[in-house]
Amino acid sequence: MLDSNTVSPVFSAKNPRTELPSINRTDSSAGRSDLSLSDSLDAETPKRDKNTMANVGIRVVISEFGIRSLADAVMTKVLKAARHKSQQTAAPLIPSKPTLTNLRTAAASCKACDLWERATQTVFGEGGEHAKVVFVGEQPGDREDLAGHPFVGPAGRLLDQALAEVGIARKDVYVTNVVKHFNWAPDQRGKRRIHKKPRYWEISACRPWLDAELRAIKPAVLVCLGATAAQALLGKDFSVMRRRGELVQSTLAPHVMATVHPSSILRAIDDQSRHEQMQSFVDDLRKIAPLIHKIRKAA
Ligand code: URA
């Protein structure tokens, strides 16, 4: 029986000539296990097989230690890279006197995380400098990546439709995303780019851009679209399903709300469900419309 301290004769199944005595490192030869292997070979093995067996034995020992140290080295590298990734952010790229214009220019060459490599371009937020409400989505989609503008694809069209229904004017709105580059992977046939959720270090790397946008605009109302935006801005335990449409306390803006992402409506299983989900989305936005009208009148 082999215990966890024993090197198994891994090559023996393929070649019975290489069957090796096991090396138990709990015995007195611990720390010199390669020597004890050679010693035991000497005792009863014909010379012809000695070289092969000793060689293989040494390879077993080396490969075991080799694999361990390789695994350690790989793990160290992975941890180092993760630490490095999680520490790297766009903060050093934020201009000293940020405006939406110079932020957009600076963000165009952002390489704070790796997403820029596969994306066509940075998709920065858009809307008026004096917008009353900021909508924050997750990341640009395929269309947005190609066009270089946020919310111009199918999800953006649904958002526009909902805004129109509740009477929120486009000029009162600024739309942006938590992550400014499209994160995607090819589909199985390699033909389509499939959206991939951004990872936490990509979100934190990108966060200084969003914070700077919010500081520049100082919106009266902030709406998080979907779980990625809500959890990035309102805390990782925030549940959109439970708290959608609720005005929540936050230092980010006087009025803050989270609702579903319009792309979830596009994924509805049938027309009826899509219609119902759209209605609920509109109902959520209807709660912020009077706030915006009041703020506009007061301005
Ligand atoms: N989805 C988003 O979250 N943002 C966009 O800009 C487009 C789709």
Image: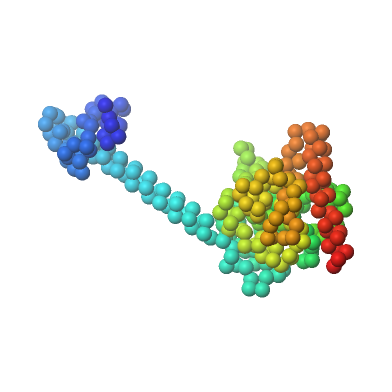
| Residue at the farthest left position | 43
Q: Residue at x 86, y 66 (%)?
A: 298
In the rendered view, would you say 227 is above or below 60? below
| Residue at the farthest bottom position | 97
Colouring of the image: rainbow
Q: Image quadrant of residue 103? A: bottom right
In the rendered view, would you say 90 is above or below 137? below
Q: Residue at x 45, y 50 (%)?
A: 78
**Which quadrant of the rendered structure holds the C terminus?**
bottom right
Q: Nearer the viewer, residue 4 or 189?
A: 4
Q: Image quadrant of residue 134? A: bottom right
266 relative position to 122: left or right: right
Q: Image quadrant of residue 210? A: bottom right
Visible residue check, residue 167 = yes
| Residue at the farthest front position | 249
In the rendered view, would you say 72 is above or below 50? below
147 relative position to 72: left or right: right
Q: Nearer the viewer, residue 164 or 139?
A: 164
Q: Residue at x 58, y 56 (%)?
A: 204
The percent coordinates of residue 193 (x first, y second) are 65, 45
The percent coordinates of residue 184 (x first, y second) are 62, 47
Q: Residue at x 61, y 47 (%)?
A: 237
The percent coordinates of residue 1 (x first, y second) are 26, 26
The percent coordinates of residue 232 (x first, y second) are 63, 53
Labels in figure, total:
0
Visible residue check, residue 160 = no
